[in-house]
Image (tube, helix red, strand yellow):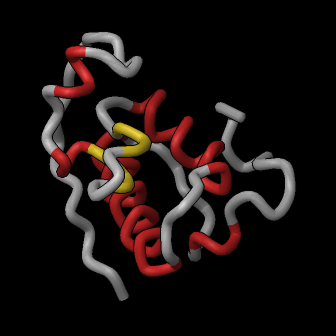
Amino acid sequence: MAKATWEPHETHASMSKGDAREKLPDTAFAFPKERKEPLTDEGHVRAALARFDQVEEVSDDEREQAFENIKKAAKHFGVDVQEESWRELGKQPHTKNPHS
């Protein structure tokens, strides 16, 4: 099982690809190596769950780590994650998560 690398890093700046996003540490992302899916608040955690299957060019090991990061961030921000495996994300409309 992969170990979560996510650490809380809350910011109120826009997370579009720009200055604020570039200043975030790798530990603020679900996919730290690729710096994809920032997890800086509840909304971003929900978005990362909803778009998990859309992230391209990552290995299964990176997906496992990203899912662990998302679960850790979700717990921190009070987001309910009912899935037990990253493989459960994206197989059908994500009805367990109201963000999608």
Camera-side residue of 84 and 7: 7
Camera-side residue of 79 and 61: 61
Residue 56 is situated, as x and y percent measured from the top left of the image, at 58, 56
How many numbered callouts?
Answer: 0
Residue 25 is situated, as x and y percent measured from the top left of the image, at 13, 41
Residue ID at (65%, 31%): 99
Decide if residue 7 is on the left or right side of residue 54.
left
Name the quadrant of the C terminus.
top right
Residue 1 is situated, as x and y percent measured from the top left of the image, at 36, 88
Residue ID at (26%, 77%): 3
Q: Quadrant of residue 72?
A: bottom left
Residue ID at (40%, 49%): 74
Residue extending farthest top:
13
Residue ID at (41%, 62%): 66
Residue extending farthest front:
57
Q: Quadrant of residue 18?
A: top left
Residue 4 in the image: above or below residue 42: below
